[in-house]
Image (cartoon, rainbow, N blue to C red):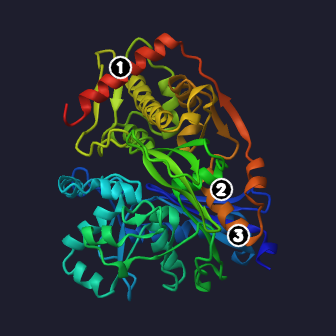
Amino acid sequence: MAAAKGYVLAIDQGTTSTRAIVFDKDMKIAGFAQEEFPQIFPKSGWVEHDPEDIWSSVLSTIRKAIKAAKIAAGEIAAIGITNQRETVVVWDRETGKPIHNAIVWQDRRSANDCEKLKARGLEKKFVSRTGLILDPYFSGTKLSWLLSNVKGARARAEKGELCFGTIDTFLIWRLTGAKSFVTDATNASRTLIYNIGENRWDKTLLDILKIPAVMLPEVKDCAADFGVTEEGLFGAEIPILGVAGDQQAAVIGQACFEPGMVKSTYGTGCFAVLNTGAKMVRSKNRLLTTIAYRLDGETIYALEGSIFIAGAAVQWLRDGLGVVEKASQTGELAAKADPQQEVYLVPAFTGLGAPHWDAESRGAMYGLTRNTGPAELAAAALEAVCFQTRDLLDAMHKDWRSASGEDTVLRVDGGMVASDWTMQRLADLIDAPVDRPTILETTALGAAWLAASRAGLWPDRKTFAKTWARERRFEPEMSAKTRKARLKGWKDAVRRTLSDS
C-alpha cells in the first residue's frame, strides 16, 4: 500500500525559487534541493516569469531531492504542492504551451482596470463574494488583461482552446501529462472570481471580467486526489494528494488549526494569517477574508494581511545596491547600525499592500544623513518588515478581539526568520512574543502533511499539531518610549509615501 512507502515529497514553488523536499515517515527532512529562476521586469511595476523556467526548476529540484534522500521515486507515497498564489498562467489545451509569460502576483499592470471597476461601483460586489478587494494583486484582472492583450486569446478561450491556472494547476497539468485540470480551494479563493461562501466559481464576476468559465479548473479540497505523475518523469507514478497556496500551507505547517491563532511568513513578501474558524469575518480595516483550508468538505476561513516586499528588500540590498554579498549577512550588518539614526525604508517597489492597498505608491527612504551607511540601510530594510507586520496585527486586533492583548503570540516562518536580529526587532516593535519553530520549512511541511495524511502516512490534525515544536521565543525588550517614537516615525514615512499624499 502507498502508506507503507514511507516518504512524502513536497514541491514548494515560490516567487524567486523552487524547493523540493523529501520527508520521511517521522516528518524529518531526508532530501532537499532548491533552485532560483529568472525574474522578468518588462516595464515599471510589471513582473513576469517564464512558465517553462518554473517547470524546469520543478523537475530538476524533484530529481535532486530524491537523489539527496538516496531513495527511488517508487518509495514516495504522495506529493504535496504549495505555490506562489495569484500568479496567472494561460496555456493551450492541446499543446500545453503557455500563450504568454506568467503574470506574477506582484505585477501591477491591471491597476487602471481595477480603478475602472471601482468607478463603476463594483468593489462591494467583489468583496462580498470573494473576500478580496479590487487590486491588481489578484488573479482575475491579470487574466482579463491577458485575454484582452494577447491576440485572439479571448476568442480561443471561449472556444475552450485555452486553460487558466495558478501555478499549482499548471504544474499538476504538466506532471500528470494533461490528465488533471484541477486546483484547490485556497488557490481558487485568491483569484477574485471564486465565491468563498458558496465554494464555486462566480458567474456574475466572470461576466464582469469577461472570463469564459470553460477555461477554469475543477476546485477540490486541499487534501484530495489531484492525479498521478507520469511514470517517465521520475521513474514511477506518484499520486498528488495535497495542494494549498503558500500562505495557507504555512498555516497548516504551523499547526494554526484553532481560531485566533496567527502565523506570519517572511519570504519574498510577508503574509500574516489569522484563523477565524468556520466563521467568515468581514474586515473593516482593509484586511482580506480568505479560505485558510478546506478539508473533508469543511471550509475554515481566515483574515489575511499581505505585504508585497519583505525578503525582496534584502534581495534589493544584495543585487541592486551591492550592500551585502549574501542575504544572510543582512542581520549581522544591521546590528552595527547607529541607533541614533532613524532611517526608514518604505518598500513600495510594487505599491503598498494591506492595510493601505495603494498600487501607485513607490518605494522611498527617509532620514538619510551623511553618516548613513550600509549598516543603517540594512537595518531600515529589515525594520520595514517588522513595521509592516505591526500594521497588519493592529488591523487584525480591531477585526478579531480575541487576537488582541497580551495573549497574542506570533508564529513565524520563512527565510528571514533565521536572523535573530530581525526576529528580536520584530518582537520589540509588535510588543508581543515571536515563536520560531524547529522546522523553518513550514510551508513545505504543510503541503507534505496534506498529502501524507491523505495517504495515511502521517497523523491527523490534532496529533500533528502536538508535534509542532518551538526552537526559540523572542520576547519584547525595547522600551515603550522608544517603540512609540519608532512607530510614529514609521507612520509618518508611510503617510509621505502614499500616492495621494
Q: Earlier in the sequence, mark 2 or mark 1?
A: 2
Does residue 67 appear in this view? no
Direction from residue 171 to residue 229 in the image, left or right: right
Q: Which percent across, then down, holds residue 357?
A: 31, 43
Q: Please, what is the three-letter code of the amino acid marked with disc 3?
A: Arg
Give the vertical position of 436 relative to 289 (above or below): above
Q: Earlier in the sequence, mark 2 or mark 3?
A: 2
Give the vertical position of 76 relative to 419 (above or below): below
Quadrant (top left/top right/bottom left/bottom right) for the N terminus: bottom right
Q: Residues within 10 Å of mark 3 (few under 14, many from 20)?
A: many
Mark-to-mark CA distance, 2 and 1: 38 Å
Q: Nearer the viewer, residue 241 or 391?
A: 391
Q: Earlier in the sequence, mark 1 or mark 3?
A: 3
Direction from residue 364 to residue 63 in the image, left or right: right
Residue at image position (36%, 61%) is 192
Q: Please, what is the three-letter code of the amino acid marked with disc 2?
A: Leu
> Which residue carries the number 2 mark?
445
Q: Nearer the viewer, residue 399 or 140?
A: 399
> Which residue carries the number 3 mark?
454
Q: Given this view, does label 2 or label 3 mark the residue nearer the observer?
A: 3
Q: Which percent across, then down, holds residue 389?
A: 47, 35
Q: Which percent across, then down, holds residue 220?
A: 55, 72
> Which residue carries the number 1 mark?
489
Residue at image position (32%, 39%) is 356
Q: Which percent across, then down, holds residue 172?
A: 52, 75
Residue at image position (33%, 15%) is 371
Q: Secondary structure at mark 2?
A: helix
